[in-house]
Amino acid sequence: MPHWGRDLRPRQFAPATGGWVGRRVLRSAAALGLFALLPLGFAAPRSSRDNTSADIAARARAIRRHAIAVDTHDDTPQRMLWENFDLGHRDPTGNIDIPRMRDGGLNAIFMSIWTPGTLPPAEASRRAFQQIDLVREQVTKHPADLMLATTAADVRRARKEGKIAVLMGMEGGHMINDDLDLLRKYAALGVRYLTLTHGVNDDWADSSTDKPAHNGLTPFGRSVVEELNRLGVMVDISHVSDKTFYDALQVTRAPVLASHSSCRALCNVPRNMSDDMLRALAKNGGVVQINFHVGFLSQEYADATKANADRGKQSISDMEKSCGENEACQGRGYQRLSDEATAQGILPVVNWQRIVDHIDHAVQVAGVDHVGLGSDFDGAVMPRGMEDVSHYGQITEELVRRGYSDADIEKILGGNVLRVMTEVERVSREMKRAK
Ligand SMILES: [Zn+2]
């Protein structure tokens, strides 16, 4: 099926998968009790305060003034790699640049270091180093706006100085080329999470969108998780198979991250997390960062792409041919084709509030301490109303509208992932001391 976004693409285009149609679908109760004893008028103090949109906007602005908004997954390095993209100017295309991050109130961004899982290992690591250089260059080029961050304390410092913290995550264990020394080099250059797989299995872990080959994590895969803990690099379980996820939880000594995953209960695709997984993640102290990709947010959209696989095939193949290897061009191509198919009524419109539905669900199942945001900007198809990062602030308003407390909204916007980073850093110090 067409997935209309590169998040799932390598699976479908891997030679072994043979074409478009994937074999599987790829790609507060205590307070309520207390209030029940009070007359109704006293039971809902917030709704009486926030019943106008001006009130909601004002409260959201107040929250954003001291919150630290962290997004844990953005594919903009593909634009840097293929199009020499500079973050400094307001770009009419794509989802991310400094002026739009300022508009949306984003305070910290994890740039995704990504290569297709099907590249030869030497080429994958070469491109990974190139992207790390490009991200670091952008920070050097825009010192008034950006600061390289490798710790939670760095992120807080950047916020205090009015700068956007730039962090790096590596999306796909294949880029370490089965070599822990190479992993250490990436960590030394500032990489602060490793997604154990991308869309295809690597040599030591199964992906959610490939045929199981290792029954989860191999013994070497377990040693990768241990080394990540020791290095203070977050173990990212987005993209991995369910078995890999549970294996990683068994091995890790620190909380894990799902850098860009949504909820299977609302959209049943393998890339999303089941309620069982959400509960296990919460028990581990980890955090799930909700992905904005329409095909992960909406069951109707996921079903319609599957049902219309043949209709999309030709135009997707044409678009990909015209983009060649330029992944950034392909990313925009998927968005354009999805918009066209939506305008023709082939695919349903997915509105941005769906993101908050997934937040609600994850909060209900895992708890408010275990949910955050990992948009997949510049790498996925965005819902209507979330065309780029300048719309980010709407999420705060919607959380206010749905009755979340200021403290809980701050956790979701970034407090939770900063807690996980801090804990990962503590475990790393402990492990290094013990050696
Ligand atoms: Zn991804």
Image (cartoon, rainbow, N blue to C red):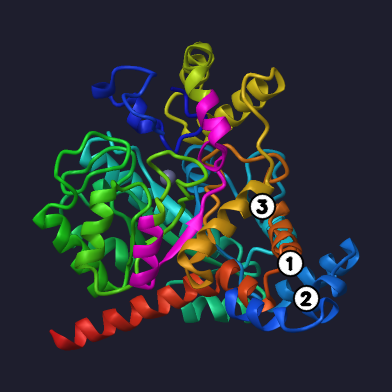
Establish if 327 lies above or below 21.
Answer: below
Residue 364 can be seen in this image: yes
Secondary element type, mark 2 = helix
Please name the predominant secondary structure of the magenta segment in the image.
Answer: helix
Magenta stretch in the rendered image: 276-304
Sooner in the amino-acid sequence: mark 3 or mark 1: 3
Tell me which residue sits at (13%, 84%) in the image.
435
Residue at numbered disc 1? 400
148 vs 221, nearest the viewer: 221
Q: CA distance from mark 2 to mark 3?
A: 19 Å
Amino acid on which disc 3 is placed: Val
Distance between the alpha carbons at the discs numbered 2 and 1: 11 Å
Q: Residues within 10 Å of mark 1 (few under 14, many from 20)?
A: many
Q: Position of residue 287 (x, y in %)?
A: 44, 65
- In this picture, residue 179 sits left or right of residue 51: left
Instruction: Evaluate if marks 3 and 1 touch, with contact meaning CB atoms under 8 Å apart.
Output: no
Label pair 2/3, CB-CB below 8 angstroms:
no
> Which quarter of the image is occupied by the N terminus?
top left
Res. 191 in view: no
Residue at 72% across, 52% down: 391
The residue pinned by badge 3 equals: 389
Position of residue 271 relative to residue 400, above or below, is above
Q: Is residue 216 left or right of residue 35?
A: left
Image quarter for ligand 1 equals: top left
